[in-house]
Image: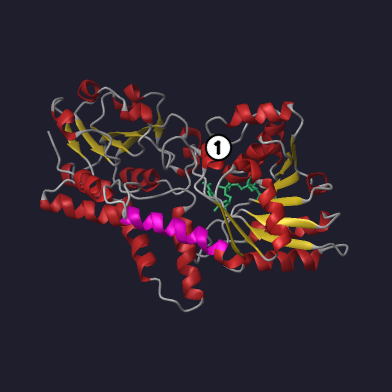
Amino acid sequence: MKISVIGTGYVGLVTGVCLSEIGHEVTCLDIDEKKVQSMRDGISPIYEPGLDEMMKRNIDRNRLFFTSSYEEGLADNEFVFIAVGTPQSKNGSADLQYLNNACKSIAESMRRDMIVITKSTVPVGTNEHVKRTITQHLQEDYKVSVVSNPEFLREGSAIHDTFHGDRIVIGSEDEESLNRVKQIYADFELPILATDLRSAEMIKYASNAFLATKISFINELGNLCERLGANIENVSKGMGMDQRIGEKFLNAGVGYGGSCFPKDTNALLSIGNSVDCDMAIIKSVIDTNEKQQRIIVDKIKEFVPDLTNKKVGVLGLAFKPNTDDMRDAPSIKVIRELVDSGAEVYAYDPIAAENARVYLPGATVYKDSIDETLEDMDFAVIMTDWKDIKEYPLEKFNEQLKNPVLFDGRNCFNLQEMQKYGVQYHSIGRPSVG
Ligand code: NAD
């Protein structure tokens, strides 16, 4: 099948590459010329495990193409996926400027009837708006069908999730376009939930908001455990064994970040406000998360009240492991606060350091290894549970740091183990040791 994908970020590029992998002919389009050139050369502009290899393979098979021209990108393709960003605007709602621009450009370059499939996360009612916008700007009288196909992949395991996701949601306005889009996914052999446009749009926000709720819930309980001498890890384990609750997303830490949960919970709140519907739970989830993101700083200040000229090693910058995405990473707030309090920050991330430079204070010094980041520091802070950080030999914290004091925002280490190595260890929702 002949498919266009508009926007080649984490969602668009992975979608395009995976669809070409199963045999479709895919043209990926982006307005960023630099990205297009790099993708043509077989280099992915984003870090996603396995993506480069799959991309190169399908370029060589002659079924994966890249362009910045809508005329070339749409050509005579039957399907166009929209996967442009829908970031948070100042008032918290989803900013649809990129989507609107994409719709106008699609309309101007359409040369046949098309099925427009929205993958971007968009407020309820947006697919109807997509249809109206494209129809208004059409040069000739073509048929435009819209389908909502929200994306559930996780950065860091995006390829795996595309092929092995829990479900594919397809919201449509007619049986014909539903069946055509089902055919695109036929080889994936995943459960398909067919529904109406508005419910499909809502499923995406509802799913992300529910996961964010689990995180804020467990973080709040973690803070309570600390005050009561309980251990949130044991509590999560006991809760997770109940199949009605499930064990996933019950890890206490420094709060959620990234390009989706913060903006999508805020967008949902704004959607609720726009129709005068009280969203008390979502509001508390957001508030709790904002407080949680600075909880590690409060802990640090409790043990090191004066941060002036203190040397701090920060391990991990990305909002989670296996991605280079720094959007809304909790490390940003924490490092800003440390720097504002007079500390000197030395930071390490195996993949995200380059992207981090855009977000972190200019004074941050970047290091190439964990050893270097810990050497001679007054204390260290873990912000991302990358594998190499979790597997760092515990005895080395004591050897490398000037003072063996570690604040762990991701609960990477076992308390009993840590106790053996003479490190003062403060984590989230668990008793401090050492
Ligand atoms: P991104 O910012 O990584 O990529 C968006 C891309 O769209 C950029 O490369 C940009 O240059 C391009 N673009 C912008 N305007 C364009 C236009 N008019 N024409 C062509 N290209 C244009 O975004 P992302 O993280 O891939 O997210 C895309 C959408 O998918 C968002 O709505 C997001 O909420 C949703 N989503 C993201 C994830 C995720 O993990 N990142 C997961 C599920 C859903």
The quadrant the C terminus occupies is top left
Q: Amino acid at mark 1?
A: Ile
274, above or below 50, in the image: below
117, above or below 156, in the image: below
Q: Residue at x 68, y 55 (%)?
A: 117
**Stretch of the chain drawn in magenta:** 200-216
Q: Is residue 42 visible?
A: no
Q: Looking at the image, which residue sits at the far bottom?
A: 276
In depth, the one of 227 and 244 nearer the eye is: 244
Q: In the picture, residue 284 is in which quadrant? A: bottom left
The picture places residue 269, in percent across and down from the top left corner, at: 45, 67
Q: Is residue 148 visible?
A: yes
Q: Residue at x 65, y 64 (%)?
A: 127
In depth, the one of 334 and 414 nearer the eye is: 414
Residue holding disc 1: 159
In depth, the one of 141 and 196 nearer the eye is: 196
Q: Is residue 297 magenta?
A: no
Q: Is residue 207 magenta?
A: yes
- Judged left or right of residue 170, residue 267 is left
- Judged left or right of residue 15, residue 422 is left
The picture places residue 207, in percent across and down from the top left corner, at: 46, 57
